[in-house]
Amino acid sequence: MPNLAAADWLILLIYGFFMLMAGFSLKPAVTGSREHMQGGRAQPGWLCGIAMLAAGLGSLELLGMGAVGARYGMAGAGFFALGSIPAMLFAALILIPVYYGARSGTAGAPARSIPEYLGLRFDRKTRALNACLFLGMAAFSAGISLYAMARVFLALHVFDQVAHGLNLPPTGFLLLAIALPAALVLTYVVLGGLGAAMYSQALQFCLALAGLLPVVLLGLKKIGGWSGLKAAVPASFLHEWSDAALAGANSMGIGAVGLILGVGLVLGGSAWCADFRLLQAPMAAKDVQSARRAPLIAAAAMVFVPFLAILPGLIAVGLPTPHTSIFVHNENGAIYHDITVVPAVVEAGQGLVPAKADTNGKPVIGADGRSVLDYDMATPNTVVQFLPMGLLGLGIAALLACLMGGVAASATAFSTVFTCDIYEAFIAKGASDKRMLAVGRWAALGGMLMAIGAACTAMRFNSLLDAMALVFAVVNAPLFATLLLGALWKRATGHGAFAGLIAGVAGALLHHGLALPRGEQPGVHGGWIAVLHRPSSDLALGLRTVGFAFCVTLIVTALVSLRTKARPEEELKGLVYSLAERPQASATWWKRPETLAAAILLAAIAVNAIFI
Amino acid sequence: MFYDARISLGMLFTLLGTILIAFGISTRDHAEVYARSLGIDANLWWGLALLAFGVVVLALGRRGQARMEKGQTAAPAKPQLRRRH
């Protein structure tokens, strides 16, 4: 494996410098809590869109997309497009205007966070419950992202010279790889707040593309173009929908209807319509038109981004697996033995995807007698394989950029939710703006420390990586159902929302505790109460848990709402879609969000139809 | 004051592109450096692409910044944007 050269280090240093500059250059602009938590609510639409996208393309997503590409092939691209584009378009057309325009009364300040919207639409208990759940999720997911990427950097061996120079043991290196990006993110978030996070996310997203695109191009060239890829991977890897539509179950083990409903509606909606880490960017836009444009821009990019993120994984499995080889050649009568030694885990892998190693460094063998592959390494290994000195620095910067964009989104969202929905709402009502700003900065620090704590726990208990799907199902899926009813149904009440949220959380835990994917041990993968049914894969279980939690919340909220007293309509003005101010239609027809949404949807269908 | 984010984006890419081009030219004759990228001087070519992107974005950003400043001197920020909670 290559070490980094001076040019690589220079690129990494420039990247770090620009991240810090985003914080320092915006520090003078952050004069109050509004500038810190909402970027002054003055950001242009394109920046909000890219920031939203970068927040949604964190390290877990980047590694996960490569892993899905290596495991299931092109089907993954359709999966990610389905899981984001419809939800983004729905958010742009219906939900963002409601969130963005929500304010207490006609003259009150606009809502600053999703929990605050819940507080305005429903009541204080719903707001507090969601705020607490969200804070836990944001810190945990940031920690897991940090750990996942630190593990990748350890396995890539590109920083070995540093680790040796500092005499670091592997755990010390892991700690450093967790703490260093966290400290960088913390610095610019504390200094510049959400504004700095968004400015740097714009840089990070472009860097991620700039780092991945040459990998894909070189990888495709190496493997012999599209036809070479076709020959190198199983035929089903290059088709998106054939199995799903025909047999009702493709290699992911999910039926076509389950796929469209589960992924398109619930999974996508829980992320892009309900997760404040993603929605904070459009809520910081300068006006409602820009706020609506943000998810549209993100959706337009999402037509292509999944392919770019999946192809490195697909290329990784398509390449020949390295083997230990002895090459004998004869030069001027002298016989040379060139021995290339390949570690056992690499040799037991498939292509560039290594096998998972146990504590002794031996490959882990699954129940079917084949080695268990570490799919998360697919994208990073492809990056290291193809990028020469110089570009390699850019490739590593791209991995770091994805990590930091996601973590920064968690940090700013944590800070905002803690400051407005816990501190201001429950601890110190009517705190001065100066105080709010200080609390916001300390909250960012607190959130980041919690994240580092979670990352260190994950270092001890590796299986926490797999708990992310459960945390998402517990927090976001019920919230999406609550927000959907709150924004679209005037009759939904505070008691209903609160009961629904609790029922949804309990439902998600119960469902996860009672089902176990085939071939897994009870525990973090599920089945920790009892094993009642066995879905075919982790992914199928995750989808079902999300869907179940969503439905439970929907039903319980509706039932309890119908039994409790509805709020009068004049109190709900601006908080429900049917009673919200209609955003003015743009003069030219092709600039209207509806037209753009339809065009993006058609483009997405057309691009994905190529791989039917 | 918030500035146009495209300025820093353009600056970053112009800088990265220049470095990659310089490095690509200086290592042109070292085939072993480019064994990994299939013999293509990927630094040079990709550096050119990044430089072009950076320059375009920087130009757009400077134009946007000029507009932003002009708009602010002509009409001070709307009162509703200034309202604090």
Image (cartoon, rainbow, N blue to C red):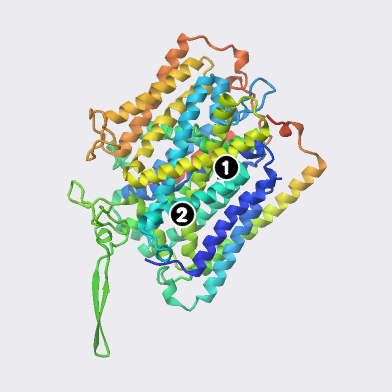
Q: Which residue is mark 1?
A: A49
Q: Position of residue A105 (x, y in %)?
A: 66, 20
Q: Is residue A478 left or right of residue A427?
A: left
Q: Which residue is mark 2?
A: A399
* Residue A337, quarter of picture: bottom left
| Closer to us: A5 or A28 | A28
The subunit carrying tag 2 is A
| Closer to us: A593 or A358 | A358
| Closer to us: A430 or A535 | A430
Which of disc 2 and disc 1 is earlier in sequence? Answer: 1
Q: Position of residue A584 (x, y in %)?
A: 67, 29
Mark 2 Cα shell of 10 Å, populated few (<14), some (14-19), many (≥20): many
**Distance between the Cα atoms at labels 1 and 2?**
20 Å
**Amino acid type for the residue under numbered disc 1:** Gly
The image shows residue A454, relative to residue A347, as above or below, that is: above
Q: Position of residue A423 (x, y in %)?
A: 57, 29
Q: Secondary structure at mark 1?
A: helix
* Residue A112, quarter of picture: top right
| Closer to us: A277 or A247 | A277
Q: Is residue A72 left or right of residue A202?
A: left
Determine the residue positioned at 43% across, 40% down: A141
